[in-house]
Image: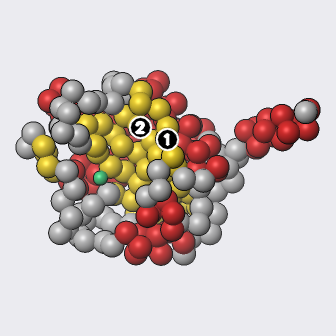
Amino acid sequence: MLAPLMMVAAVRAAGLPFSTVVIDAGHGGRDGGAVWNGLLERNLTLDVAKRLDAALRARGVRTLMTRRSDTTVELSTRAVIANRCRSAVFVSIHFNACRDRSASGIETHYRSARGKELALSVQRSLDKRVTGINRNVSYADYKVLRETRMPAVLVECGFISNKKEARLCASPAHRQKLAEAIATGILEAKK
Ligand SMILES: [Zn+2]
């Protein structure tokens, strides 16, 4: 039983080889996403995506955004944009909402094994650096994760349906922390 264990260790140590980060600001344009406590998801996602873009560029990483303004971009188009990139990882930014207003915290979704590796690294970094409950990583069969041919994750940056977390998400300083933590998590997963 040594061989499989060694293989797992080797995969972990290797990290992900990538040169570009495709940043996907969830929703936009006709698709507003969640609306709670005076916050509109599509605006928050674009703001964090732009901050993430700046944080990664400042650290010398090439980036590509699936949208840079408040425009409608279909989910399959987002995947097509990402799939044009060679040697990339895909990071989709979202905010969560739930009818149960007590729900709060940050979680990261993945669909592939390499996506999980990236998700674990991003979630670990968020847990270390950002205020909020760690809801861990989990598998999700989202279209952008399914159609992108690269390690892909979707980060739910917090519940805007939760009064306390909505107040945090409304703060530019908090969104900057989210972006910096996601950037660090992405880079810590790099080969
Ligand atoms: Zn969303």
Q: CA distance from mark 1 to mark 2?
A: 8 Å
Which comes before the other along the chain, label 1 or label 2? 2
At 31% across and 72% down in the image, what residue appears?
73
Q: Amino acid at mark 2?
A: Glu
At 34% across and 40% down in the image, what residue appears?
157
- Residue holding disc 1: 138
- The answer to whether 67 is drawn above or below residue 10 in the figure is below
- The answer to whether 65 is drawn above or below residue 168 in the figure is below
Of residues 114 and 51, the one drawn nearer to the viewer in this rendering: 114
Coordinates of residue 177 in the picture (x, y in percent): 35, 34
Q: Residues within 10 Å of mark 1 (few under 14, many from 20)?
A: some
Callout 2: helix, strand or loop?
Answer: strand
Direction from residue 104 to residue 117 in the image, left or right = right
Q: Mark 2 and ligand 1: say if the CB distance to the nearest ligand atom is below 8 Å.
A: no
- Residue holding disc 2: 107
- Residue 180 lies in quadrant: top left
Q: Is residue 186 visible?
A: no
Coordinates of residue 126 in the picture (x, y in percent): 44, 32
- Residue 69 lies in quadrant: bottom left
* Count of numbered tags: 2
Q: Amino acid at mark 1?
A: Ser
- The answer to whether 141 is drawn above or below residue 74 in the figure is above
At 49% across and 41% down in the image, what residue appears?
138
Q: Are marks 1 and 2 in contact (CB under 8 Å)?
A: yes
Of residues 155 and 179, the one drawn nearer to the viewer in this rendering: 155
Q: Is residue 121 visible?
A: yes
Coordinates of residue 31 in the picture (x, y in percent): 21, 64
